[in-house]
Image: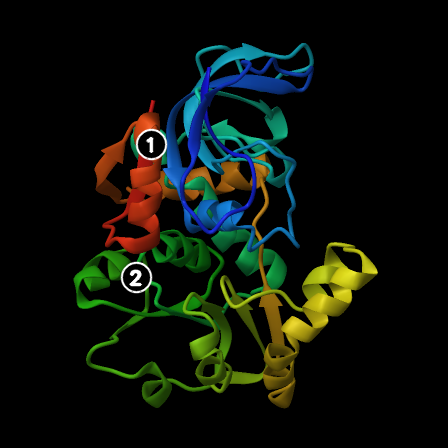
Amino acid sequence: MKAAQINQYSKSLHVQINNVQKPQPAPSEVLIKVKYAAVNPVDLMNINGSVKLIQDYQMPLTLGNEISGVVEKTGSQVTRFEVGDKVYSRLPLDKIGGFAEYVAVDQDAIWYTPKNLSLKQAVAVPLTGLTAYQGLTEELEAQPNKTLFIPGGSGSFGQMAVPIAKQMGLKVIVSGNADAKERITQLGADQYLDYKKEDYWTVLSAVDYIIDTRGAKEIEREVALLKHGGRILSLVAGPNKQFAVSRELPFWKTVLFSLAGRKWDWLARKRDSVYRFIFVRADGQQLQKITKIVEENQIVPTIDDHVFDLDHINQALELVAHGKTRGKVVIEF
């Protein structure tokens, strides 16, 4: 079968298409014929090695974190899925490989695609959905009747995070571009700030939780909005000591991440608050809950007009890295 692979970490986005052996499912795994694979910023990070301290890989590495497809074969211990089922997954961190014609995945890491979505639309759900769910429930430990602010939340992450947060009983505030206001408001946002007309740091104050999608340049402003005892979760600014300790990483990584994240921890402590960082993992049970939210809210993720085949994976990576996208960029098999 064909697969998109790298032989070493590199700043170049050049990926090779190789012929590799078709995987066979272990007893608890299903073999999925991949129909669509999504291209995400984390794929770029896996190429350049910027997250190798969190997750290092043996080479050659087949890339691709997010897939939708059809079950072609099941292992002897698989009880939940059958041949022909339409499924999707954020692939396990230690077993990525979605840029390939087939993947073998443990049944605990997948779920049935939402009934209201095609396979092409469904591939845009797992990574952002699980990021939102794990971020809200595990990192922020969000409680009902509290306030959540998502700066820059008008894109694909916001369209999943808003309805999940609303189902948890949160008041949700989003800042973003004017074009997305109606869509995000329909998903349940209680307040929407057009970033070209309103500076959120002059409008808001005393929020309980923040999910940062903007990175280091915004953290200080965001933390200043937190109530004492609040929590901020960053998707991009980087790990800290708590991240390393919670994942039982080696001592030297704990020291390194402690140094890397000390500024964010210091800023949060000044307000008696907490800084968190997330690196989302596969979880089929959580994906089941997200699927229900997608169906109940009739969420339809936006897919970019550029749809590539595997032979044009490098163009897809370049688009995600340097182009202007309108929704998730996908590879079609």
Q: Quadrant of residue 217?
A: bottom left
The answer to whether residue 298 of the structure is visible from this angle is no
Q: 279 or 134: nearer the eye?
A: 279
List x then y, in percent, for residue 213: 42, 65
Q: Which residue is mark 1?
A: 331
Element carrying mark 1: strand
Q: 317 or 135: nearer the eye?
A: 317
Is 51 displayed left or right of 128 in the figure? right
Packing grade of label 1 (10 A; few <14, some 14-19, many >=20) is: many
Q: 1 or 69: nearer the eye?
A: 1
Q: Residue at horizontal 32%, vertical 46%?
A: 318
Mark 2 residue type: Ser
Q: Residue at horizontal 36%, vertical 38%?
A: 295
State the residue lying farthest toward the right: 251
Is 333 displayed left or right of 230 in the figure? left
Point out the tag, 1 or 2, that comes first from the N-terminus. Answer: 2
Q: Are marks 1 and 2 in contact (CB under 8 Å)?
A: no
Is 20 displayed left or right of 317 in the figure? right
Q: Which residue is mark 2?
A: 154
Q: Residue at horizontal 60%, vertical 88%?
A: 271
Q: CA distance from mark 1 to mark 2?
A: 23 Å
The answer to whether residue 5 of the structure is visible from this angle is yes
